[in-house]
Each structure stands twice: as C-alpha cells, then as structure tokens.
Amino acid sequence: MSDLSSLYQEVILDHSKRPRNFHAIENADRHANGFNPLCGDKVTIYLHMSGDRIEDISFQGSGCAISTASASILTETLKGKTREEAQALFEAFHKLVTGKPVDSAGGPPLGKLAVFAGVSEFPVRVKCASLAWHTLRSALEKSAAVASTE
Amino acid sequence: MATTREIVNPAIAEAHPRLFDVRHIREDFPILKQKMHGKPLVYLDNAATSQKPQVVIDALLRYYLQDCSNIHRGVYLLSERSTQAYEDARANVQKFINAAESREIVFVRGSTEGMNLVAQTYGRQHVGAGDEVLITALEHHSNIVPWQILCEEKGARLRVGPINDRGELILGEFEKLLSDRTKIVAVAHVSNALGTINPVKQIVAMAHARKIPVLIDGAQAVPHLKVDVRALDADFYAISGHKMFGPTGIGVLYGKAHLLESMPPYQGGGDMILNVTFEKTTYNHIPHKFEAGTPNIAATIGLGAAIDYLTGVGMENVASYEHALLAYATEAIGQIPGVRLIGTAREKAGVLSFVMDGIHPHDVGTVLDQEGIAVRTGHHCAQPVMERFGIPATVRASLAFYNTKQEINALAAGLEHVKRMFA
Ligand SMILES: Cc1ncc(COP(=O)(O)O)c(C=O)c1O
C-alpha cells in the first residue's frame, strides 16, 4: 500500500477533513467557479486583492479528499502572494502533479505543496489536484480583464 | 473421464442445460485471471462494459484470419462466408430476444445509436410542435439527450416520469403524463445507475391503450434477464453488444416490422439502397434500409458468438445466480456502518450504488483499485438521477454472472479499509 500512502499523505488527509479558509469572503472583489464533470467536484475561489497582491483568499465547494486538500493548501500558500508569484507556483505545482521535473533552483519554493508529489502516480487524479488551481487562474484572469478596462 | 460434480436429479439437469458453476464460467473469461496492483482482479464494473469469453475473442480472430471480406457484395466464396456469418448473427439475435422476424433486427453501434436512430426517424416523422415525448427520471443520458435534440428542433416538450426514494418509477404519476400529445414513450428496462427494473410490460400496456409506441432501452437488461420483445410488446428495443459479453462497436435496434417499414432512413449510403439515380433513389428493404455503409462485421459476428455462449449458460441460470449474488452483496455492503445504498428498488438487477459518510466516491474508487477492485465512481451518465438523490456521485459495483461471493467479500473488506484510511 506504499503507493496509496504517497497519494493520501497525512497533510492531505488533514486538510481534506479540516479544510482551511473554507468560507466565502463577504466582499470578495472577485471569485470563480470550477467544476469537474467527471466526478462532480465543485469549487469556488474567492479573492480579495490589494493591487497586485492576494490579500485574502478562501474557497467553498465539495469534492474528493485530493481536490479539497488541494484547494485548502492553495489558499494557505497564496495568501499574501502577488499575482506573478501565484502564477509561478501554479506552473511548478502543475509540473509536480504531472510528474515533470520541477525546477528546484530557479522555481519558487513549493513548501507544503510538495505533499502532492504522489498524485503523479495516479494520472486520473491529476484533475482533482489541479481543479482549484485552474479556478484560481480564472479568478485572477477575470481581475485582469477588469484591470485592463480601467 | 468422470467428474466429481455429478448431476443426480435429471429434472434439474434438464432445467439447467449446463449446471451453473461459477468456477467453470470464470475459466471462459481469460481477462479474469489477471492481477491488478498485485491483487486478483475483482471486476465489478459490468454495467460500464462486460468482459468477453474466449469464444467471442475467437470469433473475432476467425473473421480476421479466415473470413475477412465485405458483406452483401462479393460473388466469391470469402464474401459469401462473411455475409453468412453476419446474417447468422442477426438470426441469433432474433431468436435470443424472440423477435418475430430477423428483418426486425437492425445492427447499430450500440444502444446510443439505437435511441438516436428512433429519435431522428420515427421521432422526426411523428413529433411536432406542442407534442410531447415521455421518459423517466431513471434514464441514461443516451435516452435523454436524443429526445432533447428532437424536442428542441420541433418545439416539442420532454416530460419526465418521477421516481420515489427507493429509485422506483411512480407508475401512477407516469400514467398521468400520458396524453394525446404524447407521441412516443422511451424508458430504460433496467437503470444503469441504480439497478431498478422498470415495469416495462405495464408501461407498454398503458401507452398502447393510448396508441403510443414505446422504445425500451435494454442496454442493462439483456445481459442479465431473459428478454422477450414480443411478450413485452415493445415497439423498439435497444441493445449494446459490449454490455452482453460481446465486442464494442455493435448493438441492436429491434423494431416492429411495420414501424421500421414506415420510417424514413437514418443515414444514406451504400447497402441501404436498391437503386440510385440522380433523380430518384429507392431504399432497400428493412433492415438494410437502416444499415448504411460497411458495418462492424467482426463485432457483429462476435455478438452472435456471445449470444451462443449466453444461450449455452442459460439466461434463467444467469438471472437466478445474479439475483442470489445481489442479495448477498446487498446484505454484505448494506450492513457496513457509514455505507448508504442509493437505489433500493424491490425489483432490482445486480447494481449496488452507494455513498460513504464523509468520504468522496472518487477516493473510495482509488483505494479499492489498489486492492485490485474495479468499481465505477461518478454520476454514471445519469446526472438527473444523482440530482434526485441530492448527491454528486456514487460508488457503483455492478455484477455479472462470473462474479463470486468471495469477490463481494473482497469489496466489503476494501470498504472497511477505506473507512480506516479516512477515519
Ligand atoms: C441504461 C443504458 N442505456 C444506454 C447506454 C449506452 O450504451 P452505449 O454506450 O453502449 O451506446 C448505457 C451504457 O452505459 C446504459 O447503461
């Protein structure tokens, strides 16, 4: 069962049972919804931006342990990060879960996100792990669209 | 050589042409000998597709090794052989579902194409603005979407017969939805998501009392029950070969001859015509009118072999064995604390759909897979059913006659393991 325990790391199980930042942000300036039609997982990401910086971030939704933990750890990781830093982390995270070599020297430190390395052995679960990140990106893109009209 | 299993009572021997012994049955399915992640494969996703016995694999091989040629075209021996094998398969299907004539058997890609064919031919011919098509809340997407497309095109309305908390069609409510606006009724014989067996005979009688034809989606019924289209008085009956131990890419649409004859063709092309000029084309007779182009010849022959195999085992044996196995599984799985069965119809085929407290079906599926157990997790192409029960997804274990009590025990043990992991 070594494979399974690499997927369901303690940290992941903990976040799936007790998700952090699991609420709506009252006056979020933007949010986005994500949906995985294959398994019915749903997630909403709320952002409160201060200029280019993510001042507050939260999520709601329902999903499997991997997708819930991924959203939870995402919100923990990105609070206080800039848009650019978030984008770089997404790229590094995506490499990690799809089993591509992560640039440990040049890239941003993965920190707690590293617990998702085991996902790469379970190709059908990659979408679970990345749902929240795709949703985050569309939330950020919406803000970019708003920003460009200003 | 004498075997140790002797059939003592000749009456039993006669009723069971080959006394059902699951160990022998399993020998016929080479794939079942495999290991997954080092554990014996426990294949419990038969509602998605079934495994193939060696005789079906051999039939495919034989076609490609010895008989490969197009049908209905060549004057040479090879083509004669393949045409014969193809048409023999049609006769096999006819006998198997007790159709009156072999020309009532149209070969299609699968149930999905069967439903689309009827919607696009009979449906377009008879359903107009303000008319209604009646289905049930238990349908697979393939018996919903073709009717939605038709209704949208025609300005007609799709009506849906509701189900109760057990996942049974509420027949009284269903009957109220039948009116002179209803132009066709389309219902699943057996629900793939919940296993409910619909009272199709009563449904047909209700609809016929109002002169409304009925299409039955038999994708999940034919592999598990003895189906007699004439006893049901079905107007159309759709079947998927791959769910009844045959190859993928082949299915059957049964239609009463007078209906098929009155319908326009579905697709145009070779084989479906008698005579073509630029001014006027005469369509071929049924069933060929609905079989445009070169069909999946190998798979059709494979389906014929699957039917021979099932006939040898005996559908009565299949049904009674699965019935007992379902009862065993319902008890074994249903009594695990934290497991809730979804779909507890009194008339049910071998499907166990369930959810677990606080554990997402997807995680259950991944953990079971590591134990070698293949189950389906998700909405099973029946999102409205999931919505009815207020859940995004279920875990579904679906049985076939090669499954065993030991495999059910493995599933139960796997679920206990899941609970420990996520406790
Ligand atoms: C009840 C039911 N109807 C129709 C279908 C569609 O069958 P196919 O995909 O073989 O066309 C399925 C397959 O899952 C089914 O379970």
Image (cartoon, coloured by chain):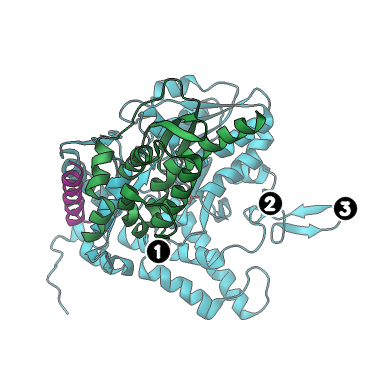
Disc 2 secondary structure class: loop
Where in the figure is residue B45, as x and y percent of width and height?
34, 52
Kindly identify which numbered label has been placed on residue A78: none
Distance (Cα) linking label 3 and label 2? 18 Å
Check whether the beta carbons of the residues at disc 1 and disc 3 lie within 8 A of each other.
no
Q: Judge from the rendering whether residue B78 lies leftward or rightward of residue A59; answer left or right.
A: right
Disc 2 or disc 1, which is closer to the eye?
2
Residue B233 makes an appearance in the image: no
Neighbor class of circle 2 (other Cα within 10 Å; few <14, some 14-19, many 20+) is some
The subunit letter for the residue under badge 1 reads: B
Q: Which residue is drawn at 42% across and 63% down?
A: A101
Residue on which the image places disc 3? B279
Q: Chain A is drawn in which colour?
A: green
The subunit letter for the residue under badge 2 reads: B
In the picture, one chain is cyan; tell me its letter.
B
State which region is magenta.
B404-423
Residue B392 position by quadrant:
top left
Residue B271 lies within the magenta run: no
Disc 1 secondary structure class: helix
Residue on which the image places disc 1? B308
Q: Earlier in the sequence, mark 2 or mark 1?
A: 2
Residue on which the image places disc 2? B267
Where in the figure is residue B419, as x and y percent of width and height?
18, 43
Q: Which of marks 3 and 2 is nearer the N terminus?
A: 2
Indicate the quadrant containing the N terminus of chain A: top left, top right, bottom left or bottom right.
bottom left
Check whether the beta carbons of the residues at disc 2 and disc 1 lie within 8 A of each other.
no
Q: Which residue is drawn at 46% across and 45% down?
A: A85
